[in-house]
Image: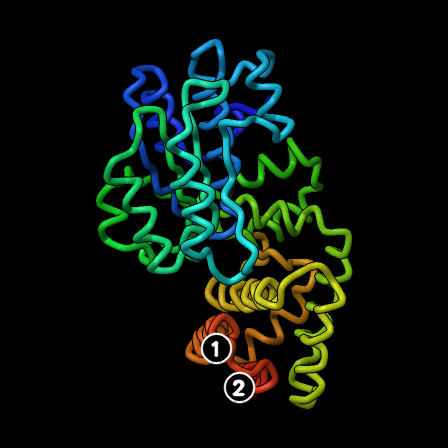
Amino acid sequence: MAGFNNIYGQDAIKEYMRNVLETRQISHAYILSGEKNSGKEFIAGIFARTLQCEKGGTEPCGECHSCRQALSGNHPDIIRVVHEKPGSIGVEDIRSQVNNDIVIKPYYGPYKIYIINEGEKMTVQAQNALLKTLEEPPAYGIILILTANAGALLPTIQSRCVKLEMKPVRDDIVRRYLMEELKVPDYKANVCVAFARGNIGRAKLLASSEDFDRVKEEAVTLLKYIHELETAEIVAAIKKISEFKLDVADYLDLISIWYRDVLLFKATNDANHLIFREEIKYIRKEADRTSYEGLEKILDAVEKAKQRLLANVNFDLTMQLMCMTIQEN
């Protein structure tokens, strides 16, 4: 059974949670913030299982009735709040699954633990409803709010919670996880580490993708010949990513990695630390033809494209603007 020893990185959060579990000075509410796929659910699950474990230690034992129930997803006192609308958690979701339920004492464990994933999706009305419970929680009630954007939570919610922030995991730790736990070969691990930017979940997503090699190959082919293609052809090639199980933003991250390689090679003339070093011929060519300023503009354009897609700006227009910057520089 997974425990705190199975969490790579996040040492401050692990130390805090173990101390809380040892002293039993449990808060009634926590905000665990970090970007998507950073491992918030994994950590919250371990914390919840340990709190309910019959042995009362600082790790879930994995053997008691409570641990077995929790692992099967059927623990009656570990409640994961669900919502029908994908874009929001409404007031009725909070009232029915938290407020009206928390008044009932635990069925089995010492606590009733509520895990609210994607907490940033709670409407203002939902947050105000939750606030009523946070103001006067029963002694056995614990609420874990997981969020990719703690700033979307009301100040009154934040002030009543212990805030724990996920930190980027060091590249060497991400690489070790991929190679030791997932048995990923080193050449693939290097791309995944660069892609992850300290987020183990993102690294795992790419490493576990059956389409990894094809996605990488298509991205590299596009970038090698990008100055010889029409803008419409480039947009069509990027749109083709929908055939794979990767988000367009993830594909844009691969483009960023390529241009960071170009920038690094231009600055050092050393291929040893490049992610795409097997493509050194094309990286050298790009480094020779593009200025430092041009590369900075390209990297900035890729980031802006990701932000525009998040803001639901038209896909074709977003890609055209990005491609124009790449081709002009």
Q: Secondary structure at mark 1?
A: helix
Which residue has dot 2 on it?
321
Answer with the quarter of the image where residue 162 lies. top left
Amino acid type of the residue tagged 2 in the rendering:
Leu
Q: Which residue is mark 1?
A: 301
Front-most of residues 179 and 315: 315
Residue drawn at (51%, 85%) of the image: 325
Query: Which residue is depicted at the point 65% across and 32% down?
Result: 181
Which residue does the image show at 35% across and 42% down from the upper left? 31
Image quadrant assignment for residue 179: top right
Q: Is residue 209 left or right of residue 254?
A: right
* Image quadrant occupied by the N terminus: top right
Kindly identify the amino acid type of the residue bearing the numbered disc 1. Answer: Ala
Task: Answer yes or no: is residue 246 visible.
Answer: yes
Q: Taking 289 as reference, is 138 above or below it? A: above
Query: Where does residue 41 sit, x and y in percent of width and height?
Result: 51, 39
In the figure, residue 270 lies in which quadrant?
bottom right
Above or below, 239 against 57 in this view is below
Mark 2, Cα crowd under 10 Å, few <14 / some 14-19 / many 20+, is some
**How far apart, in angstroms, are the residues tagged by discs 1 and 2?**
8 Å
Callout 1 touching callout 2 (CB < 8 Å): yes
Of the pair 176 and 317, the residue shown nearer to us: 317
* Residue found at x 63% / y 39%: 178
SS type, badge 2 = helix
Q: Which mark is residue 181?
A: none
Q: Residues within 10 Å of mark 1 (few under 14, many from 20)?
A: many
Percent x, y for residue 208? 70, 46
In front: 67, or 79? 79
